[in-house]
Image (cartoon, grey):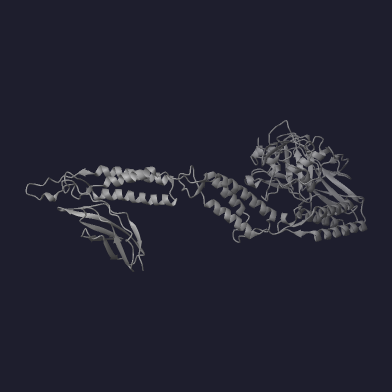
Amino acid sequence: MPVAALALLAFALAAALCPSAAFARSDASAAAGVSLKAAGSLAQQAVPDQEVRNGWVYVSVSHDGKYAVSDGEIPGQTMWRVPIDLADVGAEVDLEELGLEQFRYDADADGVYDTTLLQVMLYLNAHYAADPTLQVTGGPHSAFIHGLFGYDFNLNYYVNGQFPMDESLGSNTGASADAIVVSDGDFIDIAHYSDPNFYHDELSGYRYFYGASGQIVHSYVAAPGTDFTAKVGRVAADLDAASTFTVAEPGCTVYRTDKVDAVLPVQIGTTQADGTIQARFDEPGVYYLYVNGSQGKSTTALVSTPAFVRVYVTDASGVQQLIDALARARRDLGTTVLSSAGADGVAPSKSWVDAATAVTFKSAIAQAQATLDGPPAADADVASALGSLAAAQDVFDAAKQGGAAPDSDAYRAAVEAAGAEVLATRSSADGRDVPPSVSWSSPQARSDAMAAVYAANALLDQSSGQLASTVSVREADAALARLEDALVAFRAALKPGVVPDVTVLSRVVSEAAAAKAGIQVSAKSGSDVPKTAKWTTSAAFSALDSALSAAAKVQDKVAAGTATTIEVDDQAVAVAQARDAFLKTVKAGTKADAKPGEQAGDQPATPLKLSKPVLTAKTKSAKKNKVTIAWKKVANAGGYQLKVGAKTYTVKKATTLKKTVTVKKKAKVKVRVRAFKKVGKKTVYGPWSTTKTVRVKR
């Protein structure tokens, strides 16, 4: 069943907002779970191809309106804004080692897997839960999680006070934990409820404290003995609009305590209609305000989360400055890349530091935070903490280096070459429609290769042809490596076009040529052709000659290696059909026999057949604009007819075997010759010689 991780099972069922859930194991086994401890991956060593981020995320876990308390490796921790070091998460949690490789997520397609909420949850369970095992089912972008802090999959989680969305699945689809990239400063609230229908109630959602500007806050600063205003609000999801909204929470009972604890002995009052309440602490120190989750409007079940806020009560003037400085330091740390690959692993638009520099800066941040969280600090203590943090910030800034710029020209050239390589091939089902001089693959293989080209090309700015400043050398190299892998697979799938079998075409061409032999042309329905001869129309001759001419062109393409099997086979069928159609038109002549007294020579006893002339090597252009046509003598010829380009010439003497003609405006002409003989009143023509192309001298 689809569940909204980060969204929630209930939200998914209610509005089909997201086909995602909680943690998922690839074998979909309900019995087998995953555990960092079981996998032995707690060693502090970076996972290959896994991004290691700087900074912290802050995780809260609640059950039925109260915060959970850890009972694992780190026991007794009330699970409100528990800081999780992202560098530790990236180093410890190897999804592939845990059998969850299908849930690895590379949001920016740079070949390095991003740190996701799924990994944070695995890390959290390993260190803070008595049973670190999580059962993970589902698939990418649709993960079901069972066993977080021992809870079932009826989970709901928000990131930074918002219902997270997965844009890759559509504009109104919630994101599951495996598809949520986490960054420094993110605060993550995970809520579990016993009632599976909690999301239906209009009072469901997440409670937070708010500042004067309407923003979610996690701390207030107040002077001792002075009233200050706190405000409680609730963030809920509008499932139809796939968005979140905030409402004030009136009538909330607010407690005060000096530590984050589930035991809350002191009640200070209830919130007003606008969710505000006046609070006061008389002595300097660090305190907390707290509200429980609430029952629903239509159910007695708990349907919303609790909320804590830290209150710094101090006379020191620099506390807010220190809070702001810490926020800036954490933000700076989180936006600076931790790179073990040096500049090549970082985009030109970003800065990077090595691990040692990051650890030193983290230590300075922790010391400044300890000043806030420890005993009430005097002005001098706060000033000292501010100075130390500023000095550490300066050292950190000085250590930053810019990312290296990849070679855009080389990258573009590689992508263009890959595209040209794929486009030079053809797709085919069997290669019969591809000439042997060209390679082919299946349509799917070619489509996959082009998809890889397009993916690599997407990193280039299409107007400038340059890689974006957000692309690192490593990302560009990874993109080209993926492209090359795709090309290797594509090349392995390539085959040459099928070599055509010309046997049938050659045979039907010979048969068609033979079918014309001795057949006369009659424009008088055969009345001018002796009964002993056969005739057909000039149109029938033209149709057959046209088919033979087309076949000759295909035969030329076969010789050049550019003809396809389908082309040859289709032409063989066309010639055979033309031959058969021609033979159906052939009929016997109807001319009457010669009457007594008529010249016997008017009609031969048997039809005269003249052989095909042969052009000799003397057929050439020896002089400017002149072409000489020479041929061998044909027996029984009475003369010869020459075709030079579009012009026809007649040689009336059988003994003349050469003729020179003038050719203008053409660089080359085609020439051929045939014999003829006058028999009675009829002229009998022999077949044309083979056509020869002569280049004309200029």
Q: Is residue 379 left or right of residue 143?
A: right
Q: Position of residue 341 (x, y in %)?
A: 75, 53
| Residue drawn 83% across the image and 50% down it | 219
Looking at the rendered structure, the number of numbered marks drawn on it comes to: 0
Q: Position of residue 239 (x, y in %)?
A: 66, 43
Nearest the camera: 172 or 696?
696
Q: Split into 4 quadrants, where in the image is the C terminus?
A: bottom left
Relative to the observer, which residue lies in front, 676 or 116?
676
Q: Nearer the viewer, residue 549 or 143?
A: 549
Q: Is residue 654 visible?
A: yes
Instruction: Left or right? Give the position of 257 relative to 434.
Output: right
Name the residue at the top extreme: 31
Quadrant location of residue 321? bottom right
Q: Is residue 688 above or below residue 191?
A: below
Residue 353 in the figure: left or right of residue 675: right
Q: Is residue 66 visible?
A: no
**Residue found at x 75% / y 50%:** 183
Quarter of the picture holding the N terminus: top right
Residue 540 horizontal/vertical position (percent): 26, 48
Residue 375 position, x and y percent, is 92, 50
